[in-house]
Amino acid sequence: MTDTPVLTLYNTLTRQKEAFEPIDASNVRMYVCGPTVYDYAHIGNARPAIVFDVLFRLLRHVYGPDHVTYVRNITDVDDKINARALRDYSDEIDAGRMSLNAAIRAVTEKTLVQYLEDTAALGCLQPTFQPRATEHIDGMVAMIRTLIDGGHAYVAMGSEGREVLFDVASMPAYGGLSKRNLDEQQAGARIAVEAHKKNPADFVLWKESDPDEPGWDGKFPSADGEVTIHGRPGWHIECSVMSEHHLGELFDIHGGGLDLIFPHHENEIAQSCCAHGNDRMANVWMHNGFLQVEGRKMSKSEGNFFTIHELMATENFGGRKWPGEVLRLAMLMPHYREPIDFSQRRLEEAEAVLARLWRRAGEAVDSGDVSAVVESISNDLDTTDALRAINALSGAPLRAALALLGLPEAAPTIGIDLDAVQTRIDERLAFIRDKNWAEADRIRDELLSEGIQLKDGKDSETGERITTWEVKR
């Protein structure tokens, strides 16, 4: 554990900043809700990936890389995914040549690989574990059985078949994260009042599938004895089971977007606490703010819906492609709990800031101390203040600060033949010595057209002309 300022984090559960004290400093544990891999991840999905990657890096810096466990799940249980698996692989499933899990993996593999490539391009470290929901069906059935046995869940017949529902009235503390009480939730327009529910807020743990729909067989105790329900798990039970499997019944930090506070995270807490007999699931709950695009809510109907891959690989936004490190810095410029307006202007500003930082990071003279940046990030991930502190750094301290934020320490040179660039620079210097300015300018302009900007200067000791270069973004 390094000598750093006290780490403070805003806890949604208590609505205040608190000094972070891990349950076990030798194994700090964090769970973050990951993507549903039905389609490519959109730019809104990039924000929690980046925000909690910064926290992951900070925790590793403080407690050591081998003493932090970061779990980000993959949701591959989804009605749309199941329908696509049935459409594409029904013959193989019916013939017993392919399991449902294998069909789902085949359907989701492309989108999952793309998500992993996208987050890598955004500078995110791979989490310690990335469990798939389909790998934990048995655990979900087991937890649901425990909830039924404990009087926290029940089997009921709904309009679309049998369901196992969580009985929210069985948990007096329900609503503690979102600060909603049951009376308020019953009055909410978004909660369907259905006759088979004991309480309108009761939510699905397991839902029966039609005979021709894909699903898994779950055996559950009921008032009529044990019943087998061919179906699929509810959304919330997945994270309760996967987090417990990898992190235990109680862990340090649970993260996600602001939109997950209710109902998803509230219901996770209800399931986990009632299944394990605890008063909490995680000690700290963290949530990043919402994202808009050019001042409007992102939606396909608005025509401002962009995937991460689309921003990096096409010219659909702002008429150009945007590097992953530019997208990352743009996400880190506002505080993670504040809303962000994702715009072309913000990306251009981030790109200019990066170019300036890279120039100073390449300087031979070291200036400043990275501790100021660590102190800012330790204050509830205040990356806004950290970027102000970075402006006082150059050389090695600046490179260390950039690495802590997950930003490249120098302009990326992927796909560039470094030897070929140096050969052309040497040719240009030879032309300059011969005062052949036209040929020297030609080489300079050719390199610039290829995205390589030359910078002329003098060696401080010999006074000879030297030329360095950087990738122009």
Image: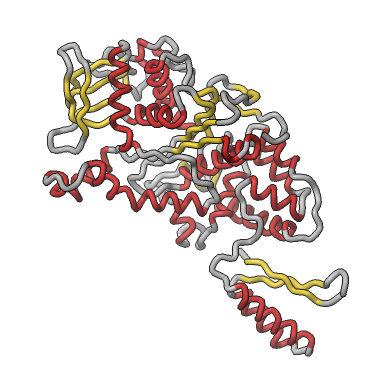
Residue depicted at 45% across the width and 39% down the height: 129
On the picture, is 172 further left or further right than 232? Answer: right
Relative depth, front residue between 448 and 117: 117
On the picture, is 232 further left or further right than 344? Answer: left
Relative depth, front residue between 162 and 57: 57
Q: What percent of the width, then of the height, locates residue 430?
A: 74, 86
Relative depth, front residue between 426 and 16: 426
Q: Relative to residue 208, is residue 302 depicted above or below? A: below
Residue depicted at 44% across the width and 22% down the height: 249
The quadrant in which residue 437 appears is: bottom right
Relative depth, front residue between 225 and 429: 225
**What colour scheme was applied to this rendering of the protein?**
secondary structure
On the picture, is 72 further left or further right than 5? Answer: left
Q: What percent of the width, then of the height, locates residue 43?
A: 47, 47
Residue 178 shows in this picture: no
Q: Relative to residue 234, is residue 464 depicted above or below? A: below
Q: Quadrant of the N terminus?
A: top right
Q: Relative to residue 144, is residue 353 depicted above or below? A: below
Residue depicted at 48% across the width and 20% down the height: 177
Q: Quadrant of the C terminus?
A: bottom right
Residue depicted at 39% across the width and 13% down the height: 182
Q: What percent of the width, then of the height, locates residue 181?
A: 43, 13
The quadrant in which residue 192 appears is: top left
Disc count in the image?
Answer: 0
Q: Relative to residue 309, is residue 244 depicted above or below? A: above
Residue 113 shows in this picture: yes
The quadrant in which residue 395 appears is: bottom right
Q: What percent of the width, then of the height, locates residue 3?
A: 73, 34
